[in-house]
Amino acid sequence: MMEKQVRYVKGEYQLLLGEKDGERYWLTQASFDCEWYWGIGYIESYRGNGRGEKSWRSHIHFDGIFLQPAKFVEGYKDFFDDRTLMDDKEIWQLLELMSAAYKCREYSDMIHRGGAHLTENPCKDFLLNPNEYARLNNCVIPELMNKVYELLAPNEGSLSLVKHEVGKRYVSDPFFEEDDGNDWAD
């Protein structure tokens, strides 16, 4: 079993998931990108280069590797030679939290754009939901990701890595008087 680790690389925190073939795999900190969606589930791998330094090897996505129906817990355990989470219950918890975050992110994108973004949706006006979009991005997704970090951090419950300040709103909330009236469909 590997010890849980957190490190700071290029302005963001990374949490160790495990090691495979001499490469260490780190879950990167979530970020609110382009001022409208959460970037979550990015995994980077690094390998020692013989001089004590670490060299970047790959960038992969959590959902593409671990959230495939045929894999789940056994796929997670089989992927790594050694890992930080050993208990099936903890692995299931991680998979549940990450799956929920991805589903919330996808739903948030749809209610922000007014459709699945394949073509113009005839129900666009019905699908646009600025209140739910604000709730998902200001509360739900940050809370899900912070629970992921608590699970993976060396001292559980002591780490909150989502790049946000308490009470900060990433998107305008129509319930607040200071809403600037931006068109949510843009």
Image (tube, rainbow, N blue to C red):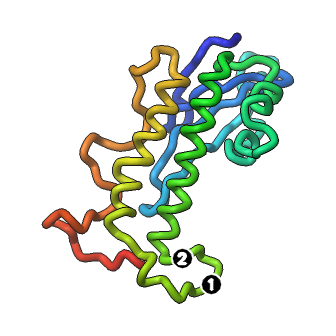
Report, in whole angstroms, how far the alpha carbon at label 2 lies from the one at label 1.
8 Å
Task: Give the x, y percent position of residue 81.
Answer: 82, 20
Mark 1: which amino acid?
A: Thr
Q: In terms of secondary structure, where does tag 2 sit?
A: loop
State whether residue 82 is above or below residue 46: above
State whether residue 135 is above or below residue 180: above
Q: Is residue 103 left or right of residue 179?
A: right
- Circle 2 packing at 10 Å, graded few (<14), some (14-19), many (20+), is many
Which residue in the structure is indicated by mark 1?
Answer: 119
Task: Give the residue drawn at x 40%, y 55%.
Answer: 136
Q: Can you tell which quarter of the image residue 80 is in?
A: top right
Task: Give the residue drawn at x 57%, y 51%.
Answer: 102
Q: Which mark is residue 97?
A: none
Q: Which mark is residue 115?
A: 2
Mark 2: which amino acid?
A: Gly
Q: Can you tell which quarter of the image residue 162 is in?
A: top left
Q: Can you tell which quarter of the image residue 96 is in?
A: top right
